[in-house]
Amino acid sequence: MTAAIYVGELVFAIALAITLLAASTLKFSLAALLFCCGLAAWTLAEYITHRFVLHAIAPVQHGKHHARPQDGIDKVFWQIWLAFAFAYLAAGGAVLAGVLVAYGWYLSVHYCAHHSPTILPASLLKHHLDHHRFANRNYGVTTKFWDRAFGTMLR
């Protein structure tokens, strides 16, 4: 069930990103710039959500994931798709396409970290698994950038 949820969301997110870019009437250079802004925005949102929402506001629920990281996800997180709709209305299709591709990368990294770890680059896998050992460090899942920038990187 877990793989089906991850793969289903991944395929839908990438298909939607491709559709948004194909439908864009922006000049290629502007669409590419906005797409990259979406990629960066996702990584920051991922970091902030993980650090401040999951660890500060909802620590009991997220703590279950830390205790049993290989347990299946039993619900689709509709809230993320609501946020994507807001991002589309606020920033447009090219930005949302970047966000969706970055979200797809997040789904892949997080799933592989707990179910197929040999697929991931060793440093990214170690970064995530260290977070499960030291919950107040390494909040980034897809990148170490924000942990370095905000001083939460485990040394």
Image: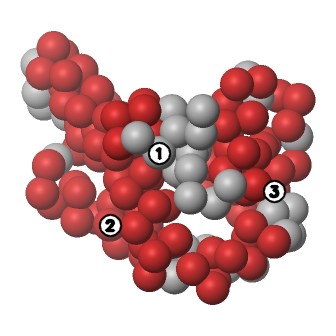
Height in image: 52 above or below 16? below
Q: Which amino acid, mark 2?
A: Ala
User: Secondary structure under badge 2?
Assistant: helix
Height in image: 115 above or below 71? above
Residue 4 image point, x, y percent: 78, 60
Rendered image quadrant of residue 147:
top left
Residue 5 appears left or right of 103: right
Rendered image quadrant of residue 134:
bottom right
Residue 143 appears left or right of 62: left
- On residue 83, the disc is 2
Which circle's residue, 1 or 3, is located before the other in the chain? 3
Q: What's the distance in space between the residues labelled 3 and 2, CA to CA?
A: 23 Å
Residue 41 image point, x, y percent: 29, 43
- On residue 3, the disc is 3
Q: What's the distance in space between the residues labelled 1 and 3, CA to CA?
A: 30 Å
Residue designated by label 1: 152
Which circle's residue, 1 or 2, is located before the other in the chain? 2
